[in-house]
Image: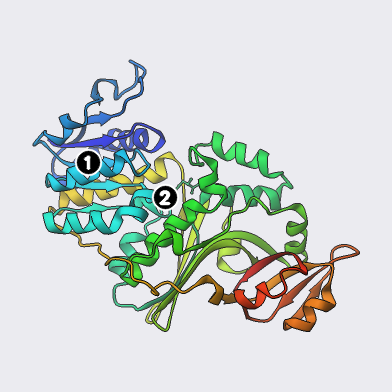
Amino acid sequence: MLNVAVMGYGVVGSGVCEVIRTNAKSLCEKLGDSVRVKYVLDIKEVNPNDPEASQIIRDFDILLNDPEISVVAEVMGGATFAYDYTKKLLLAGKHVVTSNKELVATKGTELLKIAKEKNVNYLFEASVGGGIPIIRPLYSCLAANEINRITGILNGTTNYILTKMFRDGSDFETALKEAQEKGYAERNPSADVDGIDACRKIAILASLVFGKEVECNKVKTVGITDITEADVAYAEKMNAVIKLIGQAEMKENKVYVSVEPRIIAKGTPLASIDDVFNGIMVNGNAIGEVVFYGPGAGKLPTASAVVADIIDCLRNDRNREYFWTEAEDDFVADSQYNSGRYLIITDQAEAVEEKLPVCERVVIKAGECGLVTDVITEHELSNISSYAKKYIKLCE
Ligand code: HSE
């Protein structure tokens, strides 16, 4: 019998237990032994009829001190208790797998170092892209490449909201409420709609592929709360949609990284990724371009990735060595130097055109217009901020 423990009995935790229970037979065939969730750590009351009711414990030390437990899934979220427990587990020589992007993004450098020293795994496939395989493919399948750019729709909740705004003309609040009811949204919706969740995810991907920690506070982050019906109309007039895009690009030994709503032409790979789905486009110098696509949030898709990591630990009792070194000053470029083409919405078109290279005017109503610029830096953009009602970057 292979015993594992789950910390946190929320949406993902109950999904992990469900997948292990439902797929018990095939997991046993794959591992040559049966797997059971011996403990579920949670402080909240659990219905006595819940299938895991008899596994619930409230005392972390029980699982920490049980030699039968070699693998623990941390799906509690947050970076306080989860950090303390994960650290103790790794130091005690237990593998930890997680969906907790906040913890990986903020403490991953330290936790990976401890895992390496203790020759155990700290795996986090579920932390980015929900059920989409992305961490392991980036680390293993694309290992031959120098990755130069990652561009992704990394947050299911905001993609769901934006899809509803474009497809159904929904307002923001209604679409957010639906996403929360479906269990996609974070407990605090700000983490989704303000881009914080996507920021953590692009920081994790960038740290992994570029080898040094990319700190979240260095990532220019803008959410979707200011996206209006008028913005939707401008995008539609441009035969495009708006998506919340996380991007990290390596240029001349610096990483340019951002999370922001961007206008994407219909017909391009990320434009057609709708609802709660995520899509991650990776550019490497051997593969060219590859796109990973799938359910980016939700109970069972996320549990699928967590349980895959559990299986990996049970199969390979060794360090997978995901690793990045500590953050360094100047590794992440100042966002002033981020560049691209922009849609600038203004009622002073001539003034903007005098200062910036504009290649197209988009008009949806009298009295203002959208100006599509050539490639400019954010610094150049800031020069016309007093004339702009709003600007949205294009994704090309
Ligand atoms: N709230 C997150 C999202 C959950 O909507 O993508 C998955 O990380």
Residue 85 picture quarter: top left
Can you give x and y, in whole percent of width and height, for residue 60 in the image?
Answer: 21, 31
Q: 211 above or below 82?
A: below
Circle 1 — which element? strand
Q: Quadrant of the C terminus?
A: bottom right
Can you give x and y, in whole percent of width and height, for residue 255 in the image?
Answer: 43, 74
C-alpha span from label 1 to label 2: 18 Å
Q: Quadrant of the N terminus?
A: top left
For label 1, count other residues whose C-alpha is less than 10 Å away and answer few (under 14), some (14-19) or many (20+). many
- Residue bearing the label numbered 2: 130
- The answer to whether residue 275 is seen in the rendering is no
Q: Residue at x 28, y 49 (%)?
A: 308
Can you give x and y, in whole percent of width and height, for residue 281 in the image?
Answer: 47, 67
Q: 230 above or below 238?
A: above
Residue 384 picture quarter: bottom right
Residue 72's label in the rendered image is: 1
Colour mapping used in the image? rainbow
| Direction from residue 121 to residue 74 in the image, left or right | right
| Direction from residue 343 to residue 40 in the image, left or right | left
Label 2 within 8 A of ligand 1 by Cβ = yes
Can you give x and y, in whole percent of width and height, for residue 389 in the image?
Answer: 76, 63
Q: Earlier in the sequence, mark 1 or mark 2?
A: 1
Q: Residue at x 43, y 57 (%)?
A: 201
Q: Residue at x 73, y 69 (%)?
A: 344
For label 2, count other residues whose C-alpha is less than 10 Å away and answer few (under 14), some (14-19) or many (20+). many
Q: Residue at x 8, y 36 (%)?
A: 67
**Residue type for callout 1:** Val
**Residue type for callout 2:** Gly
